[in-house]
Structures are given as structure tokens and as C-alpha cells.
Image: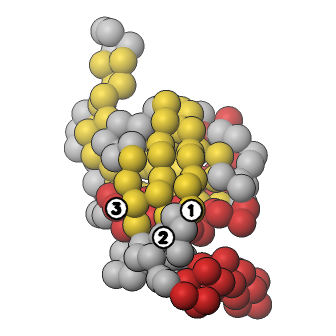
Amino acid sequence: MAVQFLSIKFSGYWNEYNRGLMPRRSGVFCIYRAFFDDQSKTTTMRELLYVGAAPNVNECLVDHPQTDRWRACLGPTDSLSFSFGSVALPDLVACEQALVMQHRPRCNAEVPSVYPFGHVALKLTHRTPLLHTRFTVGSPVSGVIGRLGGPLLRRGLDFLRSLQPS
């Protein structure tokens, strides 16, 4: 099976108080434990806490159920910082799972042990602190199943997720 190549350009940063200004588009987002230096007006990312994805990142983060969990990870001089990478809806879950598997943030409760979306190579650009900028996840599968399995499996999983009540 051929490797699917995906590229994500991250933009940011938003803090906890202006995260309502994040894009109203589908994409992945990273939550960081960060330090803001008031003198130099710079932010240093200290730890990647969480990776998520949503069809509308802005709406998802306005009142995210894990916000208190992220805050509990902060030290006295830390703050939350957010970044965003635009991803098309068909690739949203695949990109989120690849980022979680590769980086294993401590606030992502479930880190998958098997990548169910075939063989994907990701390239991350722009605002990518603490992220690997190029990596591959999944295993190539040969034969007819390999050629059809990735896209069909993704469509099947998306269909099953659409059936689940919110």
C-alpha cells in the first residue's frame, strides 16, 4: 500500500483567555503547559499536554470538558497555550490519532496501540514546538486489502462514529 502524505501547518498561539478567537474550522489542536515571560513578551512551551481534533475547533475549545484537567497540570508560573492546524474533515481523525500516537501527551487518556488508518506520513510546519515535524505511523499492508483497506476502513469508522448519539 502506498503511503498517504499529509501536511499540517500549525498557527498559534492563543492563551486561555483569548482561545475564543481560534479558527472556526476543522482541524487539530495542541494544548501546552507554557510560560509567558512578561519582560520579553515571549512564550516558552514547556510540555505538550493534549492533542485533539474537531470539526469546529473554536466551538470545541470554548467549554472543553478537560479544561480543569489541563489546568491541574500547571505550575505556579505556567499558563495554558493553544495552537491550531487546519485539517480537512476526511483526514481529521487520522491526523489526531497519528499525533497522539507519536507524541503521547499525558492528558490524552487513550493512546491507541494500533493505527487503523493504513500508512500515513505527516509533515508539520510553522508553529510546532515539542512536536516531531516529520514522522510516519501505521504499517503498510500489501495486496487488495492494503490498497482498499485504508480508505474503506476510514470511511467505515467515520460512518460508525456518525451513528453514535452525542
In contact (CB < 8 Å): disc 1 and disc 3? no
Name the residue carrying label 2: 119
Name the residue carrying label 1: 4
Q: Earlier in the sequence, mark 1 or mark 3?
A: 1
Residue 102: mark: 3
Position of residue 133 relative to residue 40, above or below, is below
Task: Give the residue at x 57% y 53%.
Answer: 6
37 or 95: which is nearer to us?
A: 95
5 or 11: which is nearer to us?
A: 5
For the question of whether residue 49 can be seen, the reply is yes
Q: Which of labels 1 and 3 is toward the front?
A: 1
121 or 57: which is nearer to us?
A: 121
The three-letter amino acid code for the residue at tag 2 is His
Q: Could you say where residue 161 lies in the image, as x and y percent from the top left?
A: 69, 84
Give the SS element for disc 1. Answer: strand
The three-letter amino acid code for the residue at tag 1 is Gln
Position of residue 50 relative to residue 38, above or below, is below
| CA–CA distance in space, label 1 to label 2 | 6 Å
Q: Is residue 82 left or right of residue 24?
A: left
Residue 34: mark: none
The answer to which quarter of the image holds residue 88 is: bottom right
Q: Is residue 66 left or right of residue 164?
A: left
Give the SS element for disc 2. Answer: loop
Position of residue 132 relative to residue 69, above or below, is above
Task: Give the residue at x 28% y 46%.
Answer: 47
Q: Residues within 10 Å of mark 2 (few under 14, many from 20)?
A: some
The three-letter amino acid code for the residue at tag 3 is Gln
Position of residue 53 relative to residue 148, above or below, is above
- Pick out the residue farthest to the front: 143
Q: Earlier in the sequence, mark 1 or mark 2?
A: 1
Give the SS element for disc 3. Answer: helix
